[in-house]
């Protein structure tokens, strides 16, 4: 008797659920799939006396899948590719796109090229992710720079990119040129560390004539925190038509020249810092052959 009551309770629970879904506008097929009852006689008993809705509600998601499947078919995709892309059955895809023309068959060489391109795109994405992880890990290794570390980094940076004194042309000027905004910011932080006041800095843009000069001037002025009118006259490089330039486009902003007025004393200190770094590297860290 207890078993019979349990069956009656299950029947009534499923019937209540079916009636609720019917009232919400679902079709018989949708109700069947929702409550997992695939016996038509039993489903008829659940819905007995319940009129069908005037307009059964169809899931919007399926409409979107159908539209996307038709779009992909018109692009020449096969059923297999559409199935992998959308995750729906081939039978559904067939119903949705059966009125569309069949795509032209690709020749084997074209299919091989397409497959190779897909593999290469995947490989490039994998490499990009590897680069991102390596860079992020290296950035964490640096952490917070001490003043001494910034002093060393700035001096080495200047010796690589700044102007140098020559025995045959004794100038001892401090002038630095670079196109990388990050390098410029680090260099300015270093100048502040070594006691150079902002009033002693002079800025000038160097750029090719074919570039957007005004945009470049605005960019560099904003980066260093001065008005465009405070920049010195921009140096325009004439373009050689025989040269194919790669530094073009919206991201090309030329170079910024930063000059320190009355910089002879600073230049001598830079030369001394660099000499000290070289001596220390050879004495304390270089292999015996270089000492």
Image: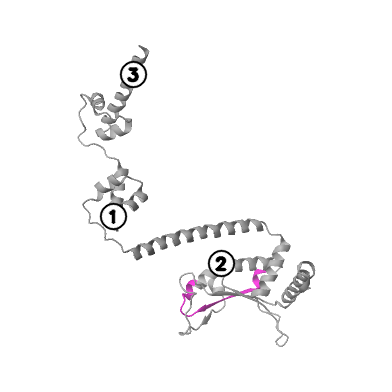
Percent coordinates x, y for residue 149 in the rendering = 71, 63
Residue at left offset 52%, top offset 69%: 219
Residue at left offset 57%, top offset 69%: 180
Q: Nearer the viewer, mark 1 or mark 2?
A: 1
Q: 257 or 85, which lies in front?
A: 85
Q: Earlier in the sequence, mark 3 or mark 1?
A: 3
Judging by the rendered image, the residue that carries numbered circle 1 is 73
The label number, if any, that marks residue 223 in the structure image: 2
- The reply to whether dot 2 and dot 3 touch (C-beta < 8 Å) is no
Residue at left offset 75%, top offset 70%: 277
- The reply to whether dot 3 and dot 1 touch (C-beta < 8 Å) is no
Percent coordinates x, y for residue 2 in the rendering = 37, 13
Give the vertical position of 90 relative to 276 (above or below).
above
The label number, if any, that marks residue 7 in the structure image: 3
Q: Visible in this render: residue 289?
A: yes
- Please indicate whether residue 154 sits to the left or right of residue 5 in the image: right
Q: 86 or 258, which lies in front?
A: 86
Callout 2: SS: helix
Percent coordinates x, y for residue 178 in the rendering = 59, 73
Callout 3: SS: helix
Q: Quick check: is 200 in the magenta stretch?
A: yes
Alpha carbon of mark 2 to alpha carbon of mark 3: how far? Answer: 77 Å
- Please indicate whether residue 233 sits to the left or right of residue 153 in the image: left
Q: Quick check: is 172 in the magenta stretch?
A: no
Q: Which residues are magenta?
A: 197-215
Residue at left offset 57%, top offset 77%: 232
Q: Earlier in the sequence, mark 1 or mark 2?
A: 1
Label 1 crowding class (10 Å Cα cut-off): few <14, some 14-19, many 20+?
A: many
Q: Earlier in the sequence, mark 2 or mark 3?
A: 3
């Amino acid at each position: 008797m207890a078993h019979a009551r349990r069956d009656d309770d299950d029947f009534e629970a499923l019937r209540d659920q079916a009636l609720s879904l019917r009232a919400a506008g679902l079709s018989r097929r949708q109700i069947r799939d929702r409550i997992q009852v695939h016996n038509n006689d039993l489903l008829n008993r659940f819905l007995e006396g319940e009129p069908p809705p005037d307009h059964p509600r169809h899931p919007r998601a399926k409409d979107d899948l159908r539209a996307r499947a038709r779009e992909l078919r018109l692009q020449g995709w096969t059923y297999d590719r559409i199935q992998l892309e959308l995750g729906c059955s081939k039978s559904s895809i067939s119903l949705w796109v059966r009125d569309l023309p069949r795509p032209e068959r690709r020749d084997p060489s074209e299919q091989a090229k397409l497959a190779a391109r897909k593999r290469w795109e995947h490989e490039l994405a994998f490499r990009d992710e590897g680069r991102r992880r390596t860079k992020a890990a290296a950035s964490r290794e640096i952490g917070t720079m001490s003043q001494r570390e910034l002093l060393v980094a700035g001096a080495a940076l200047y010796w690589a990119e700044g102007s140098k004194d020559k025995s045959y042309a004794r100038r001892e000027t401090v002038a630095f040129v670079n196109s990388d905004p990050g390098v410029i910011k680090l260099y300015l932080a270093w100048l502040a560390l070594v006691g150079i006041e902002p009033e002693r800095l002079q800025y000038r843009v160097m750029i090719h004539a074919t570039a957007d000069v005004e945009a470049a001037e605005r960019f560099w002025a904003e980066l260093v925190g001065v008005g465009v009118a405070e920049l010195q006259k921009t140096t325009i490089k004439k373009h050689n038509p025989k040269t194919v330039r790669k530094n073009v486009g919206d991201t090309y902003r030329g170079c910024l020249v930063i000059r320190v007025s009355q910089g002879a004393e600073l230049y001598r200190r830079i030369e001394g810092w660099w000499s000290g770094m070289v001596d220390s590297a050879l004495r304390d860290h270089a292999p015996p052959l270089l000492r």
